Image: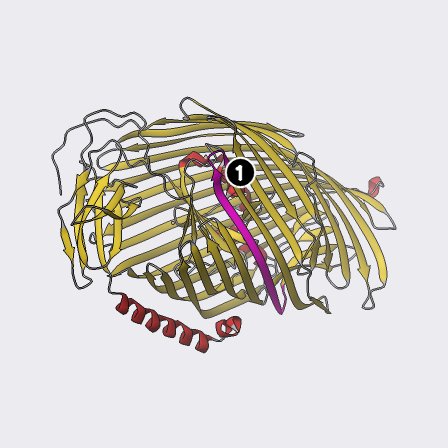
Amino acid sequence: MLFILLKSSRSYYGLVFILFFNTMAVNAQQKLGRVTGKVVDEKLADLPFTQVVLKKGTDTSTVKALLADEKGDFSFQVPNGSYLIEVKMMGYTTRLTAVFDIVLAEERELGTIVLQASETQLAAVSISAKLPFVERRADKLIVNLNGLGSGAPIMEVMNQLPGVSVTPDDRITLNGKSVQIYIDGKATTLSSEALAGMLKGISSSAIQKVELIAQPSAKYDAAGNGAIINIIRKRNYKAGLNGNVYAGGGKGTFGKANGGLNLNYKGKAYNLLLNLDYNYNKYFYDSYIASTFVDARGIALGQSTTDIKSIRTNANYTPNLGVDFYLSKRTTLSASVKPGFQTFGRNSTANIDNGVAQSQFINLVNIRATNFSSGLRLQHQIDSLGRDLTIDLDYYRYGNYNDQDNRTVTFSPASDLPSVVGQDRVFDVYALKMDYTHPLGKGQQLEMGMKTSYVNAINTNFYQDFASQQTNLFDYKESISALYLTYARNGEKFSYQLGIRGEYTNGQGEQEFGKDRFTRSYFQPFPSVHLDYKFIKNHTLSLGMNKRVERPGYESLNPLVRIISSNNLQQGNPALKPLVAYNADLWYGYKNAFFFGLTYSHSVDDFTSISVPLVDGVISTLPGNADYGDYFTLQAMYGKQVLPWWYTSSNVILSKRSFKGVFNGALLESDGIASLSATSYNSFLLSKNFSVMFLLNYRGKSVDRTITNRAFTYVTAGIRQQLLNKRASIQLNAMDIFKSYRSEYNQNSGTLQQLWRNQFETRMVKLNFSYSFGGTVKNTKKSNGTEEERKRSALSEN
C-alpha cells in the first residue's frame, strides 16, 4: 500500500499535504518556545562543540545539556518558564548568562556568547565531552568518529560504520545499495579508481564525522539510485598550525605504498588547508571467461574460452589546496583547487580456444589520467537565527588517455596481427548551485535552492594494423537544471522533512562514424518524505520515501569499443534510457545502537548488463534496460562501544531482487533468490594504547538481474599501537587471511551464456603509521567583541 501511494504522484502529493497540515496542528498544540545562541572566542572565531547547559532560573538545576555544533550554534526547545544558560569548555572560563523568561512560546535569541581563554596555557587541548557515536536524524545517520580508526585510512574505517561494507576490490555499499561519495557536502569528482586511491590516502584522523544517507532528500541531486556517504573533514577552529602526516606500505604478491600530509593553518582572517595524498599499487588480475552460444530452445551451438593473465600497476597522486577567507563575522569565501594525477599500466596475455582453433592475444596498456577540480563557495550567515545563504561555483575536468599495443598470435606467422589502439576520454563539467536556509522558529526550517550544470564528454578511438586505419569520435553534451524546496520540523518526539525537487535534462549525442545522433529532453519531479518518531524513550521509528533517477554514465552511452581480448569487447549503448526508481524504507532504532529495517525499491527501465554475439565468435558486453526491477531487503545493524575496551559494528542483510526484460530477442525474467550477507567488525582494547581488530565479511549466493553471483567470505585482522600520548599510531593489518574472496558469476543473455571467474590480489599485509601535530592554544589577551555528474564520468577498469 505504501508503495502504491508512492507511485501515484497525485496520491503522493496528497499524503505530503496531509502530513504537513497534521504536523503543523500538532506543533501548534505543543506551544514550545525556543532558545538560540552562538559561542565564539575572544577573536570572535566560532567555538565548536562547547558544552551548553540550560538551567532553571529559580534554582539553577539542570534542565537540558548539549554540545554546540561545529559553528558554535546551539538551540533548545523549552516550555514557558524562567531559565539561564551556562557555557563551558576546557581551556576557557565558564560563562553564565543572565536569567531570562520564556512566555507565550516565544523565541529568545541570546546573541553571541564570548568565552575567555583561561590564564593557563594548555597544550593539545581536547574537549572532555564527546559527541555521541551515532546521531539519528529524520533523513540520515551521523557517525561522529571520535578517534575511531586512530589514523587508519578512511577506506579501511568504512567497514566499521553501521551498514557500510567495502569489498577487497573497493566496492562500497550502504545497506546493500551502491553509494555516491560526497566530501564536505559535494559529490566527488574522481573516477572510481582515483576515488578508491584517494580514500585509501585520507587519514581518519582528518575526518570529523560521516553522514550515512540511505534515502537522499530533495536537497540532493536526484541522480543515482543509491545511497550517499558524506565525509566531513575537520577544520582547525583554533589559531595556529595543525597537521597530520602518514605513511604506509604493504606486500601481497607485489608491493604497495601510500603516504601523505595534511596541514591546516588558521589565522584571524583566513584558514588554509593543504592535503598531499599518494597511493601506489601493483597487483595481478586474472580472468577466465567461458562463453556458450545457444539457440532459442537452449541447445548449445558452440563454446569458446578465454584465459587472461595480467599484471597491473596503479598510482594516484591527489594534492588539494583550500583556503577560507573570513570576509566578515558572518561571511566566508572558500576556494579550492584539487589536481589529480593517475597512471595505470596493464600487461596481459589471453589464451583463446574457440573449439576449432587456438590463439593468443597480447595486450599492453598505458593510461595517463588527470583530474582537475576547482571551486568557489560563498557562505553568508544572514543572522544569528540560522538564516544562511550558500553559493557554489565548480569546474571539473577529467582526461583519460589510453594507449594500447596489441598482438594476436595464431601460431601461424602469416596470420599474426599486431595493432595499435588509442582511446581518449575527456569530460568537462561546469556547475552553479545556490542553497538558502530559513528557520521558521519552534524547530521548523525551510530550505530551498537551485542548481544548473553542463557536461561535455568527448570520446575518440584510433585503430591501426598493418592493413587498415580507423578513427571514430563520440561527442555527448548534457545540461541539467534543478529547483528544490524542503520543509522540516524537529520536535521532542516527532520530526519530519518534506521535499520536492524538479529537474529538466537535455542531452545530445553524436557519433562521427555513421553520423548517428540522438537527443533527449525531459522534466521530472522528485518528491521525498522522511519521518522520525520517538514513541518511547530510546525507541524510534523512521520512514523514508523518495523518487530517484539514475542517468546512464557518460561511458555507458559511448558506443566506441574497448578491448578486453581479441574476442571479448566492451562498449556503451546510446539507446540506454535513464532508470527511474521509487524507494521506501522503514526503520526501528533502539538507543542509536540497534537498527532493524525493511526497504523496497521499484525501478522502471532497470539497468542490466548483457552480452551480444557479433561475428566470428566475437562477443560485446554492453548495458541495457530491463522493463522493471524490484529489490527487497530485511536488515539488522548494531554498532556500539559495548564496553570501554570493546567496540563492535555488525550488520545482517537478507535481500532479494527480481526483474523482467527482453534481450537478444529472448524474454528474460527472474524472481531472484533470497540472499544473506553479513559483516562484523570488532575492536578490543587490550591495554591503554594497544588494540586488536577482526573483520568478517560474508556474501551469500545472489541473483542480480542477469547475473548469478557465487558466495564468498573473507577475514581481516589487525593490531594497533598508539604512541606519543596518542598523537601517533602504528597499525598492522592482514587482509583476506584465508584467501577466500572470490569474484565468480554466471551471466544469462538469452542466446549467450557466460561464466566469469576473476581472481586478483586480496591477501596482503599492510603497515600504516600516522602522526598528528599542532593544537597548542596560547593565551593572548584581546578586547571583547560582540560540496552526480561527475560520478557518471567514472571509467570501469577492464
Amino acid type, label 1: Glu
The secondary structure type at the circle numbered 1 is helix
Left or right: 280 in relation to 268: right
**Relative to 35, is 670 above or below?**
below
Q: Which residues are magenta?
A: 625-646
Let me know if residue 295 is in the magenta part: no
Residue pictured at 83% horizontal, 68% vertical = 297
| Scheme by which the image is coloured | secondary structure
Left or right: 245 in relation to 740: left
* Residue 466 on image: x %, y %: 72, 44
> 10 Å neighbourhood of mark 1: few (<14), some, or many (≥20)?
some
Q: How many marks?
A: 1
* Residue 422 found in image quarter: top right
* Residue 685 on image: x %, y %: 50, 30
Residue pictured at 24% horizontal, 33% vertical = 267
Between 691 and 761, the one nearer to me in the picture: 691
Question: What residue would you read off at disc 1?
Answer: 156
Residue 327 seen in the figure: no
**Relative to 83, is 105 above or below?**
below
Between 594 and 425, the one nearer to me in the picture: 594
Q: Main secondary structure of the magenta part?
A: strand
Residue 676 seen in the figure: yes
**Relative to 162, is 1 above or below?**
below
* Residue 200 on image: x %, y %: 51, 37
Residue pictured at 56% horizontal, 56% vertical = 474
Q: Furthest residue to the front?
A: 59
* Residue 174 on image: x %, y %: 53, 51
* Residue 445 found in image quarter: bottom left
Let me know if residue 645 is in the magenta part: yes
